[in-house]
């Protein structure tokens, strides 16, 4: 399995209704991308690090499934038209889990 994680912060000048709309669109991704498993999205509640305000995680069976999602036309369009204009910073990490450890 591959876990794809994204942590992010909206720009300060983004209206709350835009934040709500972008989060709602993200929440619809599992319906649009059948290879997604166990999608979760939420606001950062950490008392140790508030660098990022939100995060999501989603699982894919294979790296190919992840790459197909990332390179799909609808994902690229979302990133270009809806995501980049409103996001201040982000951190993305994707990793294998389950079975034998891939930690080196």
Image (tube, helix red, strand yellow):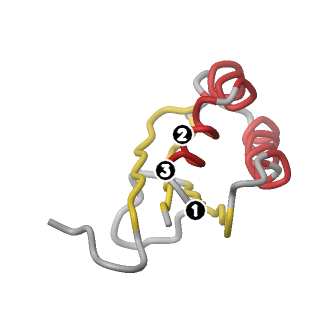
Mark 1 and mark 2 in contact (Cβ < 8 Å)?
no
Q: Is residue 82 visible?
A: no
* Among numbered discs 2 and 1, the one appearing first in the sequence: 1
Of the pair 33 and 14, the residue shown nearer to us: 33
- Separation of marks 3 and 2 at Cα, in angstroms: 6 Å
Number of dots carrying numbers = 3
Q: Which image quarter: residue 101?
A: bottom left
Give the structural element (helix, strand or loop) at label 3: helix
Crowding near the residue tagged with mark 3, few <14, some 14–19, many ≥20 C-alpha atoms within 10 Å: some
At horizontal 75% and vertical 41% (from top left) the residue drawn is: 16
Say which residue label 1 marks: 61
Above or below, 2 against 80 in this view is below
Give the structural element (helix, strand or loop) at label 1: loop
Q: Is residue 57 left or right of residue 95?
A: right
At horizontal 26% and vertical 68% (from top left) the residue drawn is: 102
Q: Is residue 53 visible?
A: yes
Tell me where residue 82 appears, x and y as whole percent.
Answer: 71, 26
- Most extreme residue toward the left is 104
Above or below, 95 against 92 in this view is below
Say which residue label 3 marks: 63
Tell me where residue 37 appears, x and y as whole percent.
Answer: 68, 65
Mark 2 and mark 3 in contact (Cβ < 8 Å)?
yes
At horizontal 39% and vertical 51% (from top left) the residue drawn is: 93
Question: Any mark on residue 67, and which?
Answer: 2
Q: Which image quarter: residue 84?
A: top right
Crowding near the residue tagged with mark 2, few <14, some 14–19, many ≥20 C-alpha atoms within 10 Å: few
């Amino acid at each position: 399995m591959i876990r794809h994680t994204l942590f992010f912060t909206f720009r300060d000048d983004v209206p709350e209704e835009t934040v709500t709309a972008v989060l709602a669109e993200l929440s619809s991704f599992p319906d649009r991308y059948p290879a997604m498993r166990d999608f979760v999205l939420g606001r950062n509640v950490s008392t140790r690090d508030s660098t990022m305000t939100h995060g999501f995680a989603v699982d894919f069976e294979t790296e190919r499934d992840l790459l197909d999602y990332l390179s799909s036309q609808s994902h690229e369009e979302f990133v270009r038209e809806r995501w980049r204009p409103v996001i201040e910073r982000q951190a993305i990490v994707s990793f294998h889990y389950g079975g034998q450890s891939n930690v080196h």
